Amino acid sequence: MATIIIPTPLRKFTNNTARLQIREGTVGESIKELTTNFPDLKKHLLDETGGIRSFVNVFVGDEDIRDLQQEHTEVRADTVVSIIPAIAGGVRDQAIVLNNIKF
Amino acid sequence: MITIEAEAEKQMNEDALKAFPDECCGFMFGNEDESGHRWVTASLAVQNSSADNKKVRFVISPKDYLKGEQFAMDNDLQLLGIYHSHPSHPAVPSEHDRVAAQPWFSYVIISVEKDGVKSTRSWVLNDTARFEEETFNQSINTTQ
């Protein structure tokens, strides 16, 4: 079995489990297995077409699957798959998201 | 509610001032108690990896993110959230902050000018993917 590491902000959807065992295959199959077992993860990992969301990075070992074979990247028994949320933001496009903001 | 210990907050504020007029960013570590109160005991500044204008954007690279998770694991702490600065702008999340935000994390925003930090506020995404302000307690000094 391979290992998949869940990032802290998504552990509320995996019963606070950080590391899960997954079957060998491809990254796409691993993500599918994960979202089948933990359905609340789905909207955070997959877009409306079923592909991995652009705000989600998936690494196999130290490599981004975008630099490998994307979702077809092989997952072997000794593979560690890391789900890494994109962390970004900034003041550009400042927009109030609540009505009662105090400045 | 989130409480940031004095030393951690000092490091965050220094990071915001040092980076000015660019945005700074980093991690906050600590623990969450049974009531949901978050206690930040450590912060870790990381490079703003934005390829865009760093005055209005920040990005934490995936490899730096992994370092943050590793730091939490090595020190038996939780990665409680992300801080970043808004140079010459209020400590209020932008639409860009909201779209890229993760559930559960606390997002602390430091409003900073050249001569110092003006305000610090903390935000958490609610179940409808909108930010709600989190009660923020400043500077508990534990070094006495």
Image (cartoon, coloured by chain):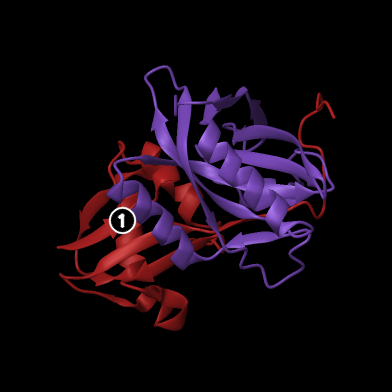
Chain colours: A red, B purple
- The type of residue carrying mark 1 is Ile
Q: Residue furthest top?
A: B35
Residue A102 is left or right of residue A50, and the answer is right
Q: Residue furthest bottom?
A: A68
Residue A34 is left or right of residue B1, and the answer is left
Asked if residue A52 shows in the view, the reply is no
| Residue B100 pos. (x, y %) | 62, 52
- Secondary structure under the numbered disc 1 in the rendered image: strand
Above or below for A54 versus A91:
below
Nearest the viewer among A52 and B71 is B71
Residue B64 is left or right of residue A6, and the answer is right
Above or below for B31 versus B17:
above
- Residue at point 76% right, 46% down? B94
> How many numbered marks appear?
1
| Residue B17 pos. (x, y %) | 72, 51
Quarter containing the N terminus of chain B: top right
The residue that label 1 is drawn on is A5
Q: Tell me the quarter of the picture where residue B108 sits.
A: top right
Asked if residue A27 shows in the view, the reply is yes
| Residue A75 pos. (x, y %) | 25, 72
Quarter containing the C terminus of chain B: top left
Residue B116 is left or right of residue A49, and the answer is right
- Residue at point 82% right, 43% down? A95
Q: Chain of mark 1?
A: A
Q: Residues within 10 Å of mark 1 (few under 14, many from 20)?
A: some
- Residue at point 30% right, 36% down? A15
| Residue B36 pos. (x, y %) | 45, 22
- Residue at point 72% right, 60% down? B57
